[in-house]
Amino acid sequence: MIVIREAKLSDLDQLMEISSATGSGMSSMPTNLQSWQAKLEKSEESFAKEASEPKGEIYFMAMEDADNGKIVGTTAIYAGVGLSQPFYSYKVSKLVSFSKELDKKNQMEVLHLVNDFTGTTEIGSLYLDPDYRKDGNGRFLSRCRFLMFADFPDRFGETIIAEMRGWQDGEGQSPFWEHLGRKFFGLGFENADFMSSVKGNQFITDLMPRHPVYSDLLPEAARNAIGKPHNASAPALRLLEKEGFRYSGYADIFDGGPTVQCQVRNIQTCQDRAQGTVGEIVPDERLAKQERYIISNQNRDDYRFICAPLIIEEDGSLTLSEVAATALRIGSGQTLSYVL
């Protein structure tokens, strides 16, 4: 049984191994023990506290193969980004000028350094072990976050964003960074990415250009990378687009990757989510041929998701298998959230 649950400090060693596997470009998962420890402590604190609005909480979750205890995936929700330190993006806009004397019109693409997403909720840190990229696990890992929005709406902002990892060439180089960021910071992409995740982004505030950047002055490789996702991020982006997320002209300041966004009320999983009370818990074989649903136990003290067969009875009650009930740590009479 695959279970998604709150990540714990006891998962630290396995999460460090996952960080090593992700490579550069995932600044939320650096290969740094102190950063991971701080993140997990913050996550445990966030799940435990009472909250009525987003104030910088982190909800970090692990996908676990319950049969062997291995963490095979991760995902996280960052509620209220940019409240403790600036959250930077490039806003891509067009500047049009016209000369009557020359009978010439110029249309230029311009990058503006902005903090437009301050206070929004960000989803990120999505990783799935290559051996588990099957049986709908990626879809399950992505959609569980949206079920949490519906379960605890007061904890999150109206706008949800996701910064997609930016495009890199065959040698693992980010052309956007090489032709823009490096000019101002004098650092390799991996070093800058690591510093941002471990030491904060004060150095961005200190050194990033405040004036608009005309992208037409950049080499073609850098221009083409603006708003283009990493090849490894393309499947995750497609899942988000199915949920209603759209690219609206914002790019990551390091690698130029696209930032997509959607209002909570427009996210498909949030719209489709339903609730029901557990009635019967039956032997597994009785549900073997039933459709599988993503199910949450709605218990913030031990928040868990599974993807398992479910019967919705005529009276609205839910029939679960014994293995599903055990994985969710629930019994009869408890209210669950579910989505097909």
Image (cartoon, rainbow, N blue to C red):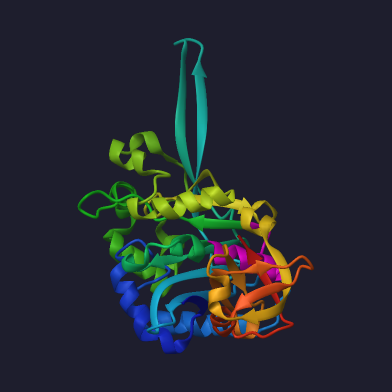
Pick whichever, 213 or 127, lies toward us: 127
What secondary structure is the magenta-colored segment mainly? helix
Q: Is residue 135 magenta?
A: no
Q: Position of residue 165 (x, y in %)?
A: 39, 56
Q: Residue at x 74, y 82 (%)?
A: 333
Task: Please identify the residue farthest to the right as the structure is shown.
Answer: 315
In the displayed structure, 130 sits above or below 260; it is: below
Q: Is residue 88 left or right of residue 80?
A: left
In the displayed structure, 131 sits above or below 244; it is: below
**Image: magenta residue range:** 143-159
Pick whichever, 284 or 154, lies toward us: 284
> Would you say residue 82 is visible in this rendering?
no
Pick whichever, 327 or 120, lies toward us: 327
Q: Position of residue 79 (x, y in %)?
A: 60, 68
Q: Residue at x 31, y 63 (%)?
A: 24
Q: Is residue 97 left or right of residue 171?
A: right
> Would you say residue 271 is visible in this rendering?
yes
Task: Please identify the residue farthest to the front as the structure is shown.
Answer: 286
How many marks can you see? 0
Q: Position of residue 18 (x, y in %)?
A: 34, 74
Q: Is residue 44 left or right of residue 200?
A: right
Task: Please identify the residue farthest to the left as the structure is shown.
Answer: 171
Q: Quadrant of residue 300?
A: bottom right
Q: Could you tell me which quadrant the C terminus lies in? A: bottom right
Q: Residue at x 49, y 81 (%)?
A: 7
Q: Is residue 151 magenta?
A: yes
Q: Position of residue 72 (x, y in %)?
A: 38, 74
In the displayed structure, 219 sits above or below 184; it is: above
Pick whichever, 181 or 57, lies toward us: 57
Q: Quadrant of residue 332?
A: bottom right
